């Protein structure tokens, strides 16, 4: 087990990177604490897998340092870093049985035979493949193979960390949920640092205590699922987390707040303060669909909007409204009754209305 | 689905049947024809049944050359297969160096058989050949035309030089087909180099190795021109392999009946052993 620290890390796959676009990972600092269960969440191509491979040592970063418990490990191979990694697609040793596959990392580590046997059976039980132990690995189905692949990552007890690179991609949905719970249990049981790469927010929040959201080669936010939901640090986090994502509206600076079209939204005094001091023209406001309040009667702080569409998702409804040419999504309970084309009145509770400048959240200084 | 009974479909097989008949069956049948007759001249043929076969099977000269043939093919496989795998493992994975290695390796394969024989005949001579002269200078008494062991070693060395590249090229292509993820997983699992070879590379080379073993067995079992040019089968008959014995019999002595019977047996041996190899290897795979 180890604390993994990334220090001014950057990576480019080209030999002569010219602009920031040539970088798969732009300069970042980050710490994965000892024994934590983390998820690395982001869209395809944002650099998640690259970061994982840099941690494990399969990829050499072009700049910066990787530290395990404060010691630089850039020059060490994955073997010497003593790290386990599970890949997106199953990698199994076809000529061996399932048992031998699981025992392989232990044998390579010269673990005594009796220990190997106990450990392999333990892991096989967790993954529910005990009855397949003496089958040839190549005759397994795709998800059994992936379980074996995962088992090889979990079987070693002394690893610095276990890294998962979208390990459940080939597994069917029902089993997916079960295996995710399993991983969580394994984490609680053995207390190993785990980093789990995924592009699925649900997967990330069920597995991890803390989630790092990656976007364009950078970690834009690192926090608990609740923090990511309530305080998205970056417009991308707002958009990517939640379903549907945060409503984001491009606005201009106005007296006592911001405006778009003919709509004037007033903000908190400290937010107005920040706005007055900036020269940035990239200003957005954001509010989650869950926090928009809808009423059928107008009052002081409400904005009139038109209902464009209502999607009934069984337990709740997603309502699309148009406010001054801007479309917004609102999440409402099942008893929401307004029909398409009717008028509703929206209000934005102050604590949930976020202000973004150059895509980053404007936070109150205290 | 309704099955349509229509035997006219057999006509579609006719072209292939004719092609095979003219290319293989009919020539083969003439050999069969000779093997059961004693022919003295035109119009003077006598049916002798299986007599030639009986005689051929008890012929000591043939038995000796059959044994030599097995030793030679066995040695060829034992040397060339591991060596070919070794060469393929050491070759650069890509880039200009990889291409250079491929070209260098392919050169021996492009040289005609009798030229290979001639090259080694000169190369290994004690007086003017670089190799023979060099060995003699090192203090070894080496003379492939006089010494049986030297002759054998020279023939083997020549065949290794000529055909190991084929095995190496086949293995190289097999190795390149292994996805990088396997090596990454092995690195993560802390597998030793040997374990990577034993559990990843070798199992995945299996299909190309089957091809390599079969090709090398068949080719070496039918070898003719190279030792014929190099040693002429000598000294004595120590490097006279089956096909040379057969040729001497058929053309030298014009012993057509005996030669035909022997050809058939020769053909059956090659077929049988190739079949044994193939089923043994593919069956080992099927269990469980």
Image: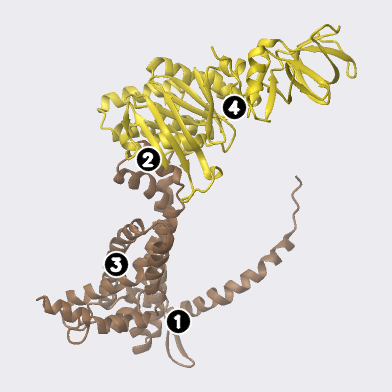
Q: Which chain is yellow?
A: A
> Considering depth in this image, is A186 or B212 the residue closer to the camera?
A186
What percent of the width, then of the height, locates residue A239? Answer: 66, 26
In the picture, one chain is brown; tell me its letter.
B
User: Which is more foreground, mark 3 or mark 1?
Assistant: 3
Residue B165's place in the image compared with A270, above or below, is: below
**Which residue sits at x=74%, y=63%?**
B8
Do the dots labelled 4 and 1 sit on one chain? no
In this view, the residue in front, B108 or A245, is A245
Left or right: residue B216 compared with residue B177: left
Badge 2: chain ID: B
Q: Name the residue under label 3.
A: B70
Q: Which quadrant, please, contains the N terminus of chain A?
A: top left
Q: Can I make out residue B276 in this image?
A: no
Q: Residue B34 carries which label?
A: 1
Outermost residue, front direction? A277
Which residue has dot 4 on it? A200
Q: Mark 3 lies on which chain?
A: B
Q: Nearer the viewer, residue A347 or B64?
A: A347
How far apart are labels 2 and 3 at the CA level? 40 Å
Secondary structure of the residue carrying numbered label 2: helix
Q: What element carries label 3?
A: helix
């Amino acid at each position: 087990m180890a604390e993994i620290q990334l220090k001014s890390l950057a990576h480019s796959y080209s030999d002569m990177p010219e602009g920031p676009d040539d970088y798969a990972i732009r300069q970042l600092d980050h710490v994965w604490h000892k024994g934590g269960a983390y998820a690395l969440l982001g869209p395809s191509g944002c650099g998640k897998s690259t970061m994982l491979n840099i941690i494990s040592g399969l990829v050499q970063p072009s700049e910066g340092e990787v530290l395990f418990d404060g010691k630089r490990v850039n020059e060490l191979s994955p073997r010497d870093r003593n790290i386990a990694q599970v890949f997106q697609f199953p990698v199994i040793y076809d000529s061996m049985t399932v048992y031998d596959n699981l025992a392989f990392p232990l044998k390579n580590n010269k673990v005594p035979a009796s220990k190997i046997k106990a450990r392999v059976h333990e892991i096989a039980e967790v993954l529910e493949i005990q009855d397949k132990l003496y089958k040839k690995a190549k005759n397994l189905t795709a998800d059994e193979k992936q379980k074996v692949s995962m088992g090889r990552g979990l079987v070693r007890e002394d690893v610095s960390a276990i890294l998962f690179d979208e390990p459940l991609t080939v597994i069917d949905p029902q089993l997916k949920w079960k295996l995710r719970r399993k991983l969580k249990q394994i984490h609680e049981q053995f207390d190993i640092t785990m980093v789990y790469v995924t592009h699925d927010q649900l997967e990330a929040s069920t597995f991890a205590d803390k989630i790092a959201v990656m976007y364009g080669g950078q970690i834009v936010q690192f926090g608990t699922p609740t923090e990511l939901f309530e305080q998205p640090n970056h417009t991308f986090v707002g958009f990517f987390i939640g379903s549907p994502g945060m409503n984001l509206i491009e606005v201009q600076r106005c007296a006592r707040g911001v405006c778009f079209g003919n709509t004037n939204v007033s903000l908190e005094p400290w937010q107005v303060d920040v706005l007055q001091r900036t020269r940035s023209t990239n200003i957005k406001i954001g509010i989650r669909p869950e926090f928009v309040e809808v009423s059928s009667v107008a009052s002081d702080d409400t904005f009139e909007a038109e209902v464009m569409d209502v999607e009934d998702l069984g337990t709740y409804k997603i309502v699309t409204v148009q406010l001054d040419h801007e479309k917004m999504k609102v999440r409402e309970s099942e008893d929401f009754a307004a029909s398409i084309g009717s008028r509703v009145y929206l209000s934005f509770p102050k604590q949930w209305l976020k202000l973004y400048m150059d895509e980053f959240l404007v936070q109150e200084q205290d | 689905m309704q099955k349509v009974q229509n035997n006219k479909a057999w006509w579609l097989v006719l072209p292939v049947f004719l092609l095979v008949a003219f290319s293989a069956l009919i020539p083969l049948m003439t050999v069969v024809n000779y093997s059961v007759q004693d022919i003295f001249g035109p119009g003077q043929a006598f049916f002798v049944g299986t007599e030639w076969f009986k005689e051929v099977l008890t012929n000591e000269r043939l038995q000796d050359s059959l044994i030599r043939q097995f030793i030679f093919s066995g040695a060829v496989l034992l040397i060339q297969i591991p060596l070919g795998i070794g060469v393929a493992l050491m070759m650069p994975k890509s880039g200009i160096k990889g291409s250079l290695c491929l070209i260098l390796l392919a050169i021996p394969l492009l040289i005609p058989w009798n030229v290979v024989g001639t090259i080694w005949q000169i190369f290994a001579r004690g007086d003017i050949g670089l190799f023979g002269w060099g060995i003699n200078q090192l203090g070894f008494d080496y003379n492939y035309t006089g010494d049986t062991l030297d002759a054998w070693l020279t023939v083997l060395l020549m065949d290794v030089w000529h055909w190991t590249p084929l095995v190496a090229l086949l293995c190289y292509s097999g190795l390149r087909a292994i996805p990088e993820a396997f090596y990454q997983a092995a690195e993560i699992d802390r597998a030793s180099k040997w374990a990577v070879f034993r559990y990843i590379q070798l199992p995945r080379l299996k299909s190309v190795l089957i091809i390599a073993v079969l090709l090398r067995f068949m080719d070496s079992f039918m070898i003719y021109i190279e030792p014929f040019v190099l040693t002429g089968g000598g000294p004595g008959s120590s490097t006279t392999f089956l096909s040379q014995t057969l040729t001497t019999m058929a053309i030298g002595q014009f012993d057509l009946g005996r030669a035909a019977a022997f050809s058939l047996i020769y053909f059956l041996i090659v077929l049988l052993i190739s079949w044994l190899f193939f089923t043994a290897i593919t069956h080992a795979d099927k269990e469980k």
